[in-house]
Image (cartoon, helix red, strand yellow):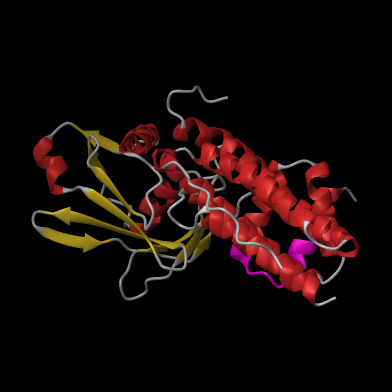
Amino acid sequence: MFEKIEAINLDRSKEEKPLETINELSIHETDLLEKAQEKIPEEKRGKFEKMKKAFLAITAGAMLLSATGCGYPFIMQRAIVSGNLDEPTMAEIFLGPAAYPIDVTKDAIKHAFEVGDTKICFYNNEISLNIHYKKPFLNNAQINIILNRISSELEKDGWIKTEDSNYGKNTPIYLNIDEAEDGTFFIDGYYKIDKNYFHGRLSDPIKWEIIKEDLLKNIKEYNGLANPDKPIR
Amino acid sequence: MNKKEKLSEIIRNSTLNDFDKNMWFVFIQSVNDEQIIPLLELLREDTTENLEIITHNLKQKIKLAGNNHLKNAQEIVDEELKIIEEKLSKE
């Protein structure tokens, strides 16, 4: 029924500019759907119009999400916190604007490691947060901001920050966050003493509930994170 | 009940998985009532099928916003036209 539509040539340099990309889609989508609509019989235009408006409304929403920093795939992801290899699935976290990276990380650390007489320490920024995404969406500067904020937050909470490089180097903490094929994420925490690695331990299954207020707050804060040059509103 | 609440209710009562429901709730948070109207209009008929269609469409666009390697804009619009064509041909 429809003619083949001309290819849309997106500028590859816009790969890290989500708003521009979705804006470009919006322009082409509106234009192409309207052209296609003109070519169909009058009696079917009403139904076409309804579908077109719905698709365009979704694009408009996706643009807003991008503008608020949520266009990043964070919105799509959830994570499984894994600590003990024998019982890997102990908790579930919804990431996204709804799940602020620091909170996710702090909770993951708290529950992935035995906390008690043994203090968990970190050395400068040697808490290693390895994020393995199938599709990169945070650049190095943004990841560094996250790491610095995690360190700062943990220090405020009374976690030991040592300048003793020997001590620190013996107890680095690693968190691996791996994206699975289905869009879920796996967080694997472990620490190293001397040359041996010890996986963290989880006690009880925990599920984090995200409330609306946090969601909106995190949208704003994540926007600040995703756009480090702009102050957080 | 305002438009946002209405759409939220449809999503909540749908058979979508938690993952997709959460995606919609974030979407609904970000738009205003007026922007919800076309979606409610579409969902008046064939609710389940149309909800699946727009859920897939929303995912594609969010992914495009985050990383245009996933599926380019051309493919998204091609697919939209194919869906509309199939819908119209059923009548």
Position above or below: A118 against A222: below
Residue A58 location (% of width, % of height): 69, 51
Q: Residue at x 78, y 75 (%)?
A: B89
Q: Describe residue B80's horizontal placement relative to residue A8 as left or right.
A: right
Is residue B41 found inside the magenta-colored segment of the image?
no
Q: Residue at x 59, y 35 (%)?
A: A67
- Magenta segment, prevailing SS (helix, strand or loop): helix
Residue A196 figure quarter: bottom left
Q: Residue at x 20, y 47 (%)?
A: A172
Q: Which of these two is toward me, B66 or A169?
A: B66
Q: Magenta part of the protein: which range? A: B8-20
Q: Describe residue A127's horizontal placement relative to residue B3 as left or right.
A: left
Residue A30 location (% of width, % of height): 69, 46
Residue A193 location (% of width, % of height): 14, 54
Q: Which of these two is toward me, A198 or A186?
A: A186
Position above or below: A232 against A84: above
Q: Which of these two is toward me, A155 or A226?
A: A226
Q: Which of these two is toward me, B2 or A17?
A: A17
